[in-house]
Image (spheres, rainbow, N blue to C red):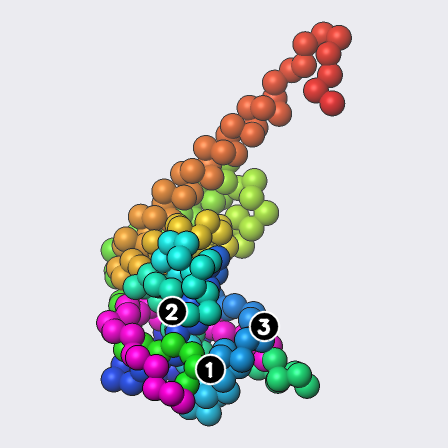
Amino acid sequence: MSSETSVQVDFSKPVPLFPLNRLVLLPHGVAPLHIFEPRYRQMVANALDSSGLIAMAVFAGNQWMREYHGKPPVRPAVCIGHIVQHIRQPDGDYLVILQGIGRARIITELPADGKRTYRRAILEPVGFGTDDADAASLRETFADALEAAPLCELRIASALAEHLRDENLPNSAVLELVAMALIDDVETRYRLLAAGEPTERARIVSQELRGIARLLKLARCQREVEAPKGCSWN
């Protein structure tokens, strides 16, 4: 797992934008991508010839459905990703593994320059290098919750609790790990991406854990309901 500072980002230079609808990359996370559109093939080729950085963005609203091949609006929070693996296919497509290295916000999008067919933007860092000490106490709280009923019923609960108690992992990284493992709702993941402070992300994760616990309790109650005599739930 790479740290957010292991790859240097020059925020004075524009970064390619790769907007999608249902994918929200978070720092420390990885996204396998099949790049087949000509403009994004060019984007990957140019990124590989320079810093290897691509900013994963999220479309704003549904305008992208009508203007996908143009420049539909994107939401301001992005995750800067670094290409850690790539394969160029015989047909020119790329298979790419992109690893999130940090949060950023779009300051301005550059106009088309006649050379590049993909979008680029000037970004500003959000929460780079922060590791709020206040989040440390929440790690124990989350670990305790994952080791107790009902969250302990989750298959990944014990592994997540073990990571939470691993003092070698920084607070920000382990919170991202828990979020990526438990949260797949696009809007919630975007809120996590847009939150610069670890304590704010911890609050969001805490809400999600409580929601999952409620669902598990409801499911348990349903299983424990006895069928009336002469009836079957099958």
Whole-percent x and y of residue 190?
A: 37, 56
Give the secondary structure at mark 2. loop
Q: Residue at x 55, y 71 (%)?
A: 33
Decide which of 111, 134 is in the foreground and name it. Answer: 111
Along the viewing direction, whichever of 110 and 162 lies nearer the viewer: 110
Q: How many marks on residues?
A: 3
Q: Main secondary structure of the magenta part?
A: strand
Q: Position of residue 208 (x, y in %)?
A: 41, 44
- Residue of label 3: 34
Label 2 neighbour load within 10 Å: few <14, some 14-19, many 20+: few
Residue picked out by circle 2: 71
Which quarter of the rendering shows the C terminus? top right
Q: Is residue 234 in sight in this rendering?
A: yes
Pointer 2 with pointer 1, Cβ within 8 A: no
Q: Is residue 33 magenta?
A: no
- What number is the disc on residue 43? 1
Mark 1–mark 3 distance (CA, rounded to whole Å): 13 Å
